[in-house]
Image: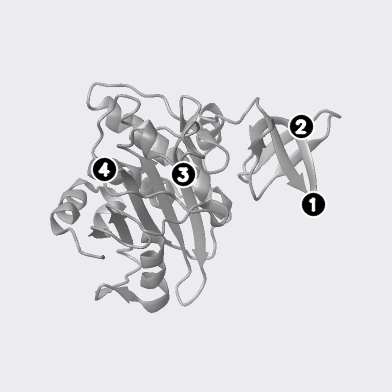
Amino acid sequence: MNKRLFEKEREVKSLLQGFSANRLVLCLDSTESTNIIAREFLTKGKAFDLEYKKDAPPLIIAAEQTMGEGRLGRCFESKRDMGLYMTAAYPLTGHEQYLSLLTLLAGLSSVKAAEKTVNSKGQKINLTLKWPNDIYFDGKKLGGIIVKMINYPNIAAIVGIGINLNQSGEDFPSEIADRAVSFKMAGIDISSSELAAEIINTLDKAVYEDKSLTSPAPEIFNELNNKSFTLGKRVSFTIDGKELVGTAEEILKNGALAVKTDDGRLYEVISGEAGFAV
């Protein structure tokens, strides 16, 4: 448990560019959760005898997680060498007016990075995003994003990303087997190191160079809407304790999902999730 993979650290580090090249890279053979280690860096100021530095925030990658964190308290299946399991810390100033976009930016960056990585090998794949945090291929879940905030002593967000790489259909738990997919099942062999680096390069550029959390460009929302798996579909959501059903219409500039119910009312779904209506 928690054995460092120094060769993989060097491999990932060599692929990082721009702001990402400053990151501390920590790769582990097995750990409870990369999110837990990211929180340790931020709350205790160090992990693995490595100091936390705002200008060199950590990127943690594990070959296996024994307690992978999913959204809404769910467990994220993280079998050894079956997926990309990583968490990146994002120091914040407190002035990020569009912080609510971080989950969507992480998803969009993951999709763009994966498509670019696959294309670089002479293959093609078209991925989409189920609002607010799932990566989809061919109508099935390929991966997910989880974002959590740390407020003391360091103000930061931790972005956890999990993507299925090498599973066959029988590797998934029975309750999700019909809804999950991997790159292997799509006929694609992809390097976890290359994918991790490309995702962080892309997301860091969006956050630090393009300043998308303070003044997002209109193109971001065009990309989010164009890549959405949710838009145009019937979804169920909860407002003030009441469950409603409507049609997903648009992803708004605050990251909310605009849903129109059958009586013509338009709702902004801000938190939680919008499940597909049966």
- Disc 4 residue crowd, few under 14, some 14–19, many 20+, Cα 10 Å: many
The location of residue 227, given as percent across then percent down, is 51, 29
* Whether residue 6 is visible: yes
- Disc 3 residue crowd, few under 14, some 14–19, many 20+, Cα 10 Å: many
Distance Cα–Cα, label 1 vs label 4:
41 Å
Residue at horizontal 36 percent and vertical 58 percent from the top:
66
Lower position in the chain sequence, tag 1 or tag 3: 3
User: Which residue position is annotated with label 1?
Assistant: 241
Q: Is residue 244 left or right of residue 193?
A: right
* Whether residue 98 is visible: no
The location of residue 163, given as percent across then percent down, is 38, 42
Which one is nearer the viewer's eye here, 160 or 94? 160
User: Which residue position is annotated with label 4?
Assistant: 192
Locate the N terminus and report the quarter of the image it occupies: bottom left
User: Which residue position is annotated with label 2?
Assistant: 260
Under tag 3, what secondary structure? strand
Q: Check disc 1 and give the amino acid type.
A: Gly
Between marks 1 and 2 in the image, the one whose residue lies nearer the viewer: 1
Distance Cα–Cα, label 3 vs label 2:
26 Å
Q: Quadrant of residue 231?
A: top right
Q: Are marks 1 and 2 in contact (CB under 8 Å)?
A: no
Distance Cα–Cα, label 4 vs label 2:
39 Å
> Which numbered disc covers residue 144?
3
